[in-house]
Image: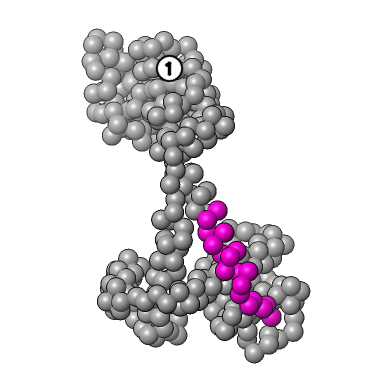
Amino acid sequence: MRTFLLTCLTLGLAAGQLRSAPPQLLNGIVAIVNDTVITENEAREYIEPAIDFLKRTVPSQSDFQEKALKAYREGLNQLIDRQLMLDDFKTAGYAMPERVIEDFVQERIREQYGNRANLIKTLKARGMTYTDFRAEIRKQFIVEQMQNHHVSSAVLISPFKIETYYQEHQDDYKLPDQIRLRMIVLNKVAGADNSAVDKLASEILTKIGGGADFKEMATIYSEGSQRAQAGDWGWIEKSVLRKELALVALGLKKGQTSGVIDTPDASYIMRLEDSRISHMRPLEEVRDEIEKTLISEERKRLQKKYIDRLREKAFIRFF
């Protein structure tokens, strides 16, 4: 394991941040899985997207080092798991028609590169050939099929499991007190004479008081991000509102319209459409959500069970 950790450092994935000088890798090999060698280059290419993400999001050098090592461990183990599934495919005597593989390859080209010309340009920059690319996509397809066969196809969530999960996780489906607002927003310009904004706000309020439809007024005049929804903010908690608006909303009754709420950056007019006290989301509302959660958890469990079984009978060595 010590050599394995040094391997991560040797790869230079930290782009100059990990500057220790560990010993050289043994012939560029990081692991052997049964009869297959996983090389330094394979590991680097596989983990590089995760490391690039860390470079952009983790400013602390010490945190980066810790997360980079973790990402490398996880990436290498994913490569090992993938090879185990490829070996299982071969050992089981499965075959995959080349036309099916080719359809999958063309689909990936369209999804990720748009067309073959863009693909070739990208491959050239990475020092890869189309043959290399096709071989990699073929492996991905086989792995997906093995996962579908051993994992996805075996997942079935009963109504009883959904109902039990709902009862055991009620805090996850509890909603706080909420209000539903419509808002007309008239923006101001900092440092300018905004008397015209104040006048327009008063005119709009007068029209609403005279019977004009609030939704129509919001659609015509509001400059807020909810204008296309006729000023509808949907169901929200009062805590999401700025202090001046929250105080006014607190005093409104259902169907009541506020006066003009003046702030340094905008004038607001709001209407309280409805309110509801803290409550549990009903089971029927969250049934699909719970089912997706349980399917995901069951797939992870079955995937781990499948990989554990493959690892028990495999030869795996780290360098």
**Residue 160 spot, x, y in % from top left:** 47, 34
**Residue 47 spot, x, y in % from top left:** 56, 70
Mark 1 residue element = strand
Q: Which picture quadrant has residue 318?
A: bottom right
> Can you identify the residue that label 1 sits on?
275
Q: Is the stretch drawn in magenta largely helix, strand or loop?
A: helix
- Which amino acid lies under the numbered mark 1 shown in the image of this protein? Ser
Quick one: 111 or 105, which is closer to the camera? 105
Query: Is 92 placed left or right of 12 in the picture?
Result: left
Queried whether the magenta region covers residue 313, the answer comes back as yes
Q: Residue at x 70, y 63 (%)?
A: 66
| Residue 276 visible | yes
Q: Residue at x 67, y 67 (%)?
A: 69
Which portion, as a residue range, is magenta?
301-319
Query: Is 102 placed left or right of 50 in the picture?
Result: left
| Residue 242 visible | no
Q: Is residue 247 above or below residue 37?
A: above
